[in-house]
Amino acid sequence: MARSIDDAVAALADRADATALAGGTWIMRAPIRREPPIRFCVGLTRIPELNAVDISASEIRIGACVTHARLVSALAGVRGCEGLVTAAGSAANPAVRQMATIGGNLCASAFPASDLAPSLLSLDAEVELSGPGGDERLPVGRFLERRGSLEPGILLTAVVIPRRALKSGHARLPLRKAGDYPVAIVSMTAELRGDGAVEDIRVTVGSVEASPRRWTQLEQALLGRRLDPNGAYDLAQAEAHIFTGRDGVDAPGWYRVQVLPALARRAAQAVLAGP
Amino acid sequence: MATNILINGEAHVSTREPMTPLLDVLREELFLTGAKSVCREGICGACIVHLDGQPVVSCLVPVGTLEGREVRTVESLAAEGEPSPLQQVMEEHDVVQCGMCFPGILMTLTSFFRERPDAGRDEVKAALVGNICRCTGYERIVDAAIALAKRS
């Protein structure tokens, strides 16, 4: 169990086979996935900075070991974070939400059904990394592309969300009402003008492909128009073909793509329902 | 490596490998077999215990992370030999079937009612999404939980 970020970075850089351990809900399931057991872990949950949530006028800084449950309680009522609170409060099940962390969720590159990753991507969040060569801040989208090939000793320490006059929504489709992985997710963050027209918007799709990504074609189509859930459905239907759904035991790939317009409508409804 | 844990109020030193699931320590070292080993991937909820007062799936908690922390299992609910109000209401409503999921359900609802003592039906159902009952006794379990909520 590391006591500081420097401690953890040194321990991770020291051994090529070392893995950072936060909430454990992904790593502890290695035997179920028939992966070789992980022999050497560097525990992060005792490092105070990694457990902090700091909300300032310009940004929200979330330590990597903050759990889903803690995100819900810390960000409830914070303007712009409605979608992230929905994502953190509906992922997996209540006991797993007490354990699973924001940093672990972003680092689990083999986990396609993350709720937080598409939500943070739609919020234009950045991640902070510490490593033997120093610190670095990069957009969460860049991190998601790079996360499979990080050099040893690189540690995700925090997620930073810029605060702007935004509204956000998160629409997910689990097969049961709750407790399952979502087969598809649409996360939407928008800045609306006084007349309801979209000034700025980011739409992301999660769980459909191996990693979440932005739906820029739909963003372009929504830009400048009044945000209307049924209109979002129609525009999404015309643009859904750019995704190639992954086949899984829970749902075939085509189904994940087919439900996207309905999720785009629900995400737009959630954005409009925000304060 | 030795890990000092407070389990149901008693000090325990575990010498198992740090990545050993807490569930295995409870069942194999302490013979606290209330928490059940079923899916071992955090989906079924049969192994839920309280860690510093919050419900967690003990199959996914590495024992090496627990130095100085407090664990409570279903065995602690009737510590004085007297079933807790939740246990009593479940017995009154004759809810228990095979019993496999039940310790986890009691632990989930015990912490849930601490925060939401007068919860409604939908909230109780939402709280139980991580507890799978293969006897499908959900409705009666929820009925009993609601009866307790109405007494508060």
Image (cartoon, helix red, strand yellow):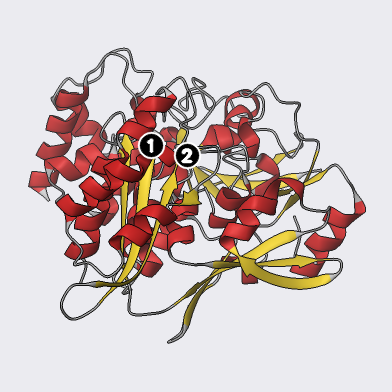
- Residue B126 or residue A192, whichever sits in front: A192
Query: Within 10 Å of the Cα at label 1, are there few (<14), some (14-19), or many (20+) other Cα atoms?
Result: many
Looking at the image, residue B84 sits to the left or right of residue B13; the answer is left
Mark 1 to mark 2: distance in Å? 6 Å
Circle 2: element type: loop
The reply to whether discs 1 and 2 touch (Cβ–Cβ < 8 Å) is: yes
Q: Residue A66 in the image: state x and y as whole percent.
A: 53, 61
Tell me whether marks 1 and 2 sit on the same chain.
yes
Query: Within 10 Å of the Cα at label 2, are there few (<14), some (14-19), or many (20+) other Cα atoms?
Result: many
Q: Earlier in the sequence, mark 1 or mark 2?
A: 2
Instruction: Point out the residue furthest to the bottom here.
Output: A57
Question: Which residue, given by chain and number where applicable, does mark 2 sit on?
Answer: A113
The numbered dot on residue A182 is 1
Could one spot residue A225 in this view of the protein? yes
Q: Residue B134 in the image: state x and y as whole percent.
A: 32, 15
Q: Quadrant of residue A103?
A: bottom right
For badge 2, the amino acid type reads Ala
Could one spot residue B77 in this view of the protein? no
Circle 1: element type: strand
- Residue A56 or residue A212, whichever sits in front: A212
Q: Quadrant of the N terminus of chain B?
A: top right
- Residue A98 or residue B80, whichever sits in front: A98
